Structures are given as structure tokens and as C-alpha cells.
């Protein structure tokens, strides 16, 4: 009898789960020089944001101005805006795929579901994990120094014996205002989404016989009906599963959700006037998007008090959140209404970002287990804010960076948090991540140089804050064609440069419907049957050059005419007495010149090393 083939991988970090937490964990770790394997059980990456589920990415910037997530999250968003103006789901899947597949140091193992692992003799560390790849009928076994569970459902928890919990805490446990009188095992449910398209004609719809029928709004529990009018909402309330087991009951819940979803669309089309005559069903998800299941327990548990006390900083801050407390009550669709006015949501908006410590991203009892995603160490109420994908992404970048630092020093996550937290934070800030209460350190080369500009005051380029925040712009406004210069007073060697351009984190300077400014992908394909395109930030620096002074002559040492990234880093390898940056055009230059006679260049930092 022939046995199934087993492929063996030996790496520094094994990441299980390829949603945004897992993707950014893998990418950030690989970019910091360690070998990574990413095992994912689906054919496409992105988790709830993939074409299989089609939920848009929410985060701190969706609710609080100037808090759009940067780092790799913004890199992916800008790539999508540039290459995918129609927001095509196949192109989106491709962008996510190539970010991982063609990143050096990553072994990408798709269609592979982790189902077993091996522990060390005393059960304190994971040694290997194994998954079955359905497309090849092959087992993949990964040996690693550190494991990161970004699977959402925390598959490594029951396999390894890692401490975790499911459900809602009592008020007495953490003193949370939204805590219960007595703890229970209920969670938020899962949803399937509907994608519809507006046409120029009336479109008929006949529901399948097995779909539920909702003749009246009362039958639908009076759920909101504006889903076709407001592109920044959706049918999120087609939600079930919170009263049971959101892992073990997934197949049965999916069947019920499909009955409800087709019944809802039948109601919109055929049971009253809901403005849906010209709309046709384009897509309905058969893979439910999950909100909550197992949550790991780390050295620290984030609580409602932390989330609402945005001014608090942790010594081991590595990420941040800012999405509202958005607690879906377990009854889901069968609860009355669809908003916080007596509906199935419990909401509270936040006015400022909150910090997330590294101690929430590693296990308290499995020494080499980390995690990033909706499964971090948080109470149910804190999780109601931290669960969204923008926040998950920055936690993933933090997790991967911390894992790389741990491997570099030959230490475990807890030891690395204790001994090397400043190194982790410096690396995150260098990679354009925002950490509340922290400033990026200046490079000695530019810190000690004389800084001047042909136009305006460039001094804020060295203040260590690379975004508008807390009432300060923190950037330099110059004119295209006018230089920013560092004068060293002597000949020095310059290895490279780092530049942070303004990518319009509030998404105010883009074309397209303003309601979509925070949403990388519309749920519906356009307002109006002709569709809607979405532009690129007009303030983004598109064309610039760098010149160096040597032996009394200026020479161009770097130039580009098609930049579309916020963070630009490149080697120079030159000796020079002075270096100047000359912005030449933004993505909106032509429009600005025709209106104002000149174009403004806005950058947050320009450093040389």
C-alpha cells in the first residue's frame, strides 16, 4: 500500500494562517532576514478580505482621523489603488499572492490545513507542525524555532495545550463596563456577504425553494435596508453561530446563512419596494466570514479599560488599534433591529488610538508560540475593537518583526520582549509603523548635518513623527522643483536613503465616491451601472531626484518618475559633501498647477545613512 508523500521544511519561523495577520507576520519576518514557512488552508490569501469572503479592511483610520495603518498595510493598499482602480477581486487576490509568493525567505504552502504537531519532551515548546495539502494529497511538516498561529480559529491551541478561552467574561474578572454578570461561552457569529450590481434594466430574481421567505420587515427582524444605497455598509447582519460553537458548527451554520441570504435578497427584490428593481445578484459567499472563536491567553490580556484609555502606553507597545468597540451580540440575525438602538450591536466609538503590547502576542505557557489576528490575548470586549483587519495587519507586522529579533538573538518571545523590546520598536518605526507615544530615532548622519530648504522650513523632517497627528502636521510643505538639502561640512560616505511621502492617510485627495475613502474594495461594483473607478492620492510624490555634491559638482545619484509608495528606501553607495532631494511632481501636479500655478510637495521624512 502506497503512503502519502511528506515534504519537510526547516525554517526559523512557521506561520499558520494566511489572513492579514499571517501574511504580514511572514512578510515582516522574512524582510528582517529569517527563513519563514507560511501554511494556509485556502487557495487565496487575505482571509476575510479575500475574494472568497469579500469583507473590506477596517481599522483605526476608519474611525479616527490620521490613524490609517501604515507599514506593510499601506504598501498593499497603495499597490491596490495603483494597479486595481476598478477594485477587481482577482487582481486583489493576485496582489496579496505575489506579496508573499515572491518575497525572498518565504516558503508559501497553500491549500494546506494544519492538523497535528509535535511537542518537546516536557510539553513547553512546539517542535514541528504538519498539514495536509488537498491539491497534491501531500503532507507538509515544518520544523521551526518559533511558531505563529494566525489561523483565526487558533488551531495550534488545542493541539499544543496552549491556554485559551472562548466566550464573554464576567464584569468581575477585569472590571469592564460591558462585562456580563456571569461569564458564558457565547461569541460573535459569522456572516456570508452579498455582492450585487446595478444595471440599466429591471432584473428578475427567483429564490431557490430551500431559501427562507421573509414577506415583511418584521419577518426580517427589521434589519436595515439601505445596503444598496450606501456602499460603505453591507449585509453584515446576515449573521449566525454565536450561540453555539463557531468552529464545530461551521458547516451547519453556513447552510442556515445561505437560506437566510437568499431569503434576504428575495425580500429586497420581491417583497416590497426597496429600490432593488435594477439590481442583480452578482455573488454570494459560500465561505462564512468568522468574527470570533478561540482567543489565546498571553502574559497580558488587553481589556476594555485599555481600549478606552487611549492615552496609556506600555513599555512593550508594538501595535495600536482605534476601531470602535463593535460587539455583535450572539443572537445575530434573529435579534431585533440592526444597529445599536436596541439592535444586535453594542457600540462605543473611540476618540484616540490605544496601544497593544507585545505581551498580548505570545503564549503564557507555550514558550515558542506567538499569534497575531483575532486570536490575540484580549478580553471579549477588547477583542470587539482589535478584531478588524487593519489592526490585525499591524499586529502581524509586529509579530513577525519580534520573531525575527528573537531568532537573531537566539531567544524565545518572552525573553525577547524583556531584553530587546527597544530593538523591536525601533525596527517597526523604521518600517513606517505608528506606535502611540513613540518617536522614530534620527540617523546620526542626518541628525548632525545642516538641514536647509530652497523653500519653506524643513525642520519637522527630523521630529520622528511620520504622519499628521495630535494637531501637528509633522511634515514639510515644499514646492516641486525646490530642493531640501543636507550639508555635512565634509566628505562622508552615504549608503542609502529613506523617504516618507504623504499618501493621504485620510483618503481625502482621491477620485471616486468619498464614502469609499477607507475601503480598499467596494462591496458593490460601482454606483450606477457604468461602474466607478477610484483614483490615487493626488498628494503622493510621483517624481523626484536626489543629487550629491562631490568635488564642487552636483550629480544625480537617484531618480524616479513613477513612485507610488509612501516608504521609499534605496541604496546610494556614494561619497559626498552634501545631498539634496528635489521633488519634481506629485500624482496631482497637473491639477494643482492649473489651479494654483504650482504644485506642493509634502513629505514627512528624508534621511540618509
Image (cartoon, helix red, strand yellow):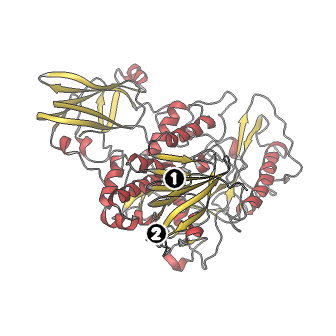
Farthest right residue? 209
Q: Left or right: where does residue 73 sit relative to residue 417?
A: right
- In percent of width and height, residue 375 lies at 54, 62
Mark 1 secondary-structure assignment: strand
The residue that appears at 39% across and 54% down in the rendered structure is: 401
- In percent of width and height, residue 433 lies at 38, 49
Q: Left or right: where does residue 586 sit relative to residue 17?
A: left
The residue that appears at 50% across and 51% down in the rendered structure is: 37
- In percent of width and height, residue 239 lies at 70, 57
- In percent of width and height, residue 607 lies at 26, 39
Crowd around label 1: few <14 · some 14–19 · many ≥20 (10 Å):
some
The residue that appears at 56% across and 31% down in the rendered structure is: 85
Q: Left or right: where does residue 165 sit relative to residue 313?
A: right
Task: Answer above or below: position of 497 versus 289.
Answer: above
- One can see residue 323 in this view: no
* Closest to the observer, 182 or 410: 410
C-alpha distance separating marks 2 and 1: 42 Å
- Could you tell me which quadrant the N terminus lies in? bottom right
Report the number of discs.
2
Q: Earlier in the sequence, mark 2 or mark 1?
A: 1
Farthest front residue? 1
Task: Answer above or below: position of 138 versus 274.
Answer: below
Crowd around label 2: few <14 · some 14–19 · many ≥20 (10 Å):
some
- One can see residue 595 in this view: yes
| Rendered image: mark on residue 9 | 1
| Rendered image: mark on residue 363 | none
The label nearer to you, 2 versus 1, is 1
Quickly name the residue at label 2.
Answer: 305
The residue that appears at 24% across and 37% down in the rendered structure is: 495
* Closest to the observer, 365 or 298: 365
Circles 2 and 1 in contact, beta carbons < 8 Å: no
- Could you tell me which quadrant the C terminus lies in? top left
Amino acid at each position: 500500500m502506497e503512503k502519502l508523500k511528506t515534504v519537510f521544511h526547516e525554517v526559523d519561523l512557521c506561520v499558520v494562517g494566511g489572513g492579514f495577520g499571517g501574511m504580514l507576520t511572514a512578510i515582516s519576518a522574512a524582510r528582517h532576514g529569517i527563513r519563514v514557512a507560511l501554511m494556509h488552508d485556502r487557495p487565496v490569501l487575505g482571509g476575510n478580505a479575500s475574494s472568497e469572503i469579500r469583507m473590506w479592511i477596517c481599522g483605526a483610520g476608519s474611525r479616527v482621523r490620521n490613524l490609517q495603518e501604515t507599514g506593510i498595510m499601506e504598501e498593499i493598499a497603495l499597490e491596490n489603488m495603483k494597479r486595481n482602480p476598478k477594485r477587481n477581486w482577482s487582481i486583489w487576490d493576485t496582489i496579496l499572492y505575489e506579496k508573499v509568493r515572491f518575497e525572498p525567505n518565504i516558503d508559501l504552502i497553500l491549500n494546506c490545513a494544519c492538523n497535528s504537531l509535535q511537542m518537546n519532551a516536557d510539553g513547553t515548546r512546539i517542535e514541528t507542525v504538519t498539514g495536509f495539502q488537498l491539491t497534491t494529497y501531500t503532507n507538509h511538516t515544518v520544523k521551526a524555532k518559533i511558531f505563529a498561529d494566525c489561523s483565526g480559529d487558533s488551531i495550534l491551541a488545542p493541539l499544543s495545550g496552549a491556554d485559551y478561552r472562548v466566550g464573554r467574561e464576567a464584569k468581575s474578572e477585569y472590571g469592564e463596563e460591558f462585562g456580563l454578570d456571569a461569564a458564558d461561552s457565547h461569541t460573535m457569529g459569522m456572516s456570508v456577504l452579498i455582492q450585487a450590481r446595478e444595471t440599466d434594466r429591471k432584473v428578475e430574481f427567483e429564490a431557490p425553494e430551500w431559501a427562507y421567505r421573509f414577506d415583511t420587515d418584521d419577518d426580517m427582524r427589521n434589519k436595515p435596508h439601505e445596503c444598496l444605497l450606501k456602499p460603505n455598509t453591507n449585509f453584515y447582519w446576515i449573521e449566525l453561530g454565536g450561540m453555539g460553537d463557531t468552529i464545530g458548527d461551521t458547516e451547519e451554520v453556513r447552510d442556515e446563512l445561505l437560506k437566510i441570504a437568499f431569503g434576504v435578497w428575495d425580500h429586497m427584490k420581491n417583497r416590497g419596494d426597496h429600490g432593488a428593481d435594477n439590481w442583480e445578484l452578482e455573488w454570494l459567499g459560500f465561505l462564512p466570514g468568522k468574527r470570533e472563536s478561540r482567543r489565546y491567553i498571553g502574559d497580558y490580556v488587553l481589556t476594555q479599560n485599555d481600549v478606552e484609555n487611549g492615552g496609556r502606553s506600555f513599555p512593550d507597545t508594538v501595535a495600536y488599534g482605534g476601531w470602535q468597540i463593535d460587539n455583535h451580540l450572539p443572537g445575530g440575525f434573529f435579534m431585533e433591529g440592526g444597529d445599536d438602538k436596541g439592535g444586535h450591536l453594542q457600540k462605543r466609538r473611540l476618540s484616540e488610538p490605544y496601544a497593544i503590547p507585545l505581551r498580548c502576542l505570545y503564549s503564557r505557557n507555550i514558550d515558542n508560540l506567538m499569534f497575531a489576528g483575532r486570536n490575540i490575548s484580549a478580553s471579549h470586549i477588547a477583542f470587539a475593537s482589535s478584531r478588524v483587519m487593519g489592526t490585525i495587519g499591524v499586529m502581524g507586522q509586529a509579530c513577525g518583526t519580534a520573531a525575527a529579533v528573537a531568532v537573531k538573538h537566539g531567544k524565545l518571545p518572552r525573553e525577547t520582549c524583556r531584553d530587546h523590546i527597544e530593538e523591536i520598536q525601533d525596527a517597526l518605526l523604521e518600517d513606517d509603523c505608528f506606535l502611540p507615544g513613540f518617536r522614530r530615532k534620527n540617523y546620526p548622519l542626518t541628525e548632525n548635518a545642516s538641514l536647509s530648504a530652497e523653500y519653506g522650513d524643513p525642520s519637522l523632517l527630523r521630529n520622528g513623527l511620520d504622519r499628521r497627528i495630535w494637531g501637528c502636521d509633522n511634515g514639510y510643505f515644499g514646492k516641486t522643483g525646490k530642493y531640501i538639502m543636507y550639508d555635512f561640512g565634509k566628505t562622508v560616505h552615504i549608503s542609502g536613503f529613506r523617504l516618507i511621502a504623504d499618501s493621504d492617510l485620510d483618503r481625502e485627495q482621491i477620485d471616486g465616491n468619498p464614502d469609499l475613502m477607507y475601503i480598499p474594495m467596494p462591496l458593490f461594483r460601482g454606483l450606477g451601472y457604468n461602474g466607478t473607478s477610484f483614483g490615487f492620492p493626488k498628494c503622493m510624490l510621483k517624481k523626484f531626484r536626489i543629487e550629491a555634491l562631490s568635488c564642487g559638482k552636483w550629480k544625480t545619484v537617484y531618480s524616479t518618475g513613477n513612485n507610488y509608495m509612501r516608504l521609499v528606501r534605496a541604496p546610494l553607495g556614494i561619497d559626498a559633501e552634501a545631498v539634496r532631494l528635489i521633488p519634481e511632481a506629485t500624482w496631482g501636479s497637473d491639477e494643482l498647477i492649473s489651479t494654483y500655478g504650482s504644485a506642493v510637495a509634502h513629505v514627512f521624512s528624508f534621511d540618509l545613512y
